[in-house]
Image (cartoon, grey):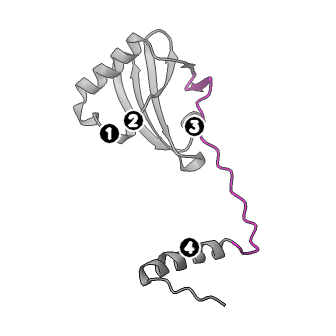
Amino acid sequence: MNIVILPHFLLYPLAVTLCIVMSGSGSSTAQPVAVSEISAPQAFSEEGTIWTLKPSMEVADKEALTQFFASQPHFQGSTNFEGPPKLFLSGTSERRFYWLYGPGDAATWSCIRFESGCFQVSEGSGNPFSR
C-alpha cells in the first residue's frame, strides 16, 4: 500500500472539493421550480385605451426618451432604466416605455409615459399589463 503525503496547502482545497462532491450524492431528487418571466403582450387595455407593442423604436421614439432624460437629469444612469425598453403606442403620439426586471410576482417594472404632451414616471411590482 502506497501512502501519499500531500503538503498542507493542497489538503484544504481537496477537502472542500470532497465535501461539495459528497453533498450532491444524497438521495434527494429536488426539481427546479419553473418561474415564468413577464413577457410583454402584443397589446393590453388600460382604462379603455388599447396599447399596442411596437417591435422596434424609430427616431421619434428615441427623441422622446432623449427629451425625457434631458428634462429629468436625476433619472440618467438609473438602474431602473437600463437596457432597451418595451415600447407601446396608443394613437399617434402617446407612448409608454416599459423596463421589466425579474420573474413572475417578484418582478419589478418602471415606465416612462408620454401622454397628452407630458411625461410621467411610474414603477411597481408584478405584471404591469394585467392590473
Instruction: Give how far across and how far down residue 40 sits, in percent.
Output: 58, 30
How crowded pointer 3 is (Cα within 10 Å; few <14, some 14-19, many 20+) is rated as few
* Label 4 vs label 3, nearer the camera: 4
Mark 3 — residue? 131
Residue type (three-letter) at the residue carrying disc 3:
Arg
Quadrant location of the N terminus?
bottom right
What is the spatial separation of the Cα atoms under label 4 and label 1, in whole angstroms? 40 Å
* Label 4 vs label 1, nearer the camera: 4
How crowded pointer 1 is (Cα within 10 Å; few <14, some 14-19, many 20+) is rated as few
Mark 1 — residue? 78
Q: Does residue 123 show up magenta in the picture?
A: no
Q: Are marks 4 and 1 in contact (CB under 8 Å)?
A: no
Q: Which portion, as a residue range, is magenta? A: 25-50
Q: Earlier in the sequence, mark 3 or mark 1?
A: 1
Q: Main secondary structure of the magenta part?
A: loop
Q: Tell me: residue 111, above or below residue 37.
A: above
Query: What residue is at 69 percent from the left and 57 percent from the top?
Result: 32
Mark 4 — residue? 17
What is the spatial separation of the Cα atoms under label 3 and label 2, in whole angstroms? 23 Å
Quadrant location of the C terminus?
top right
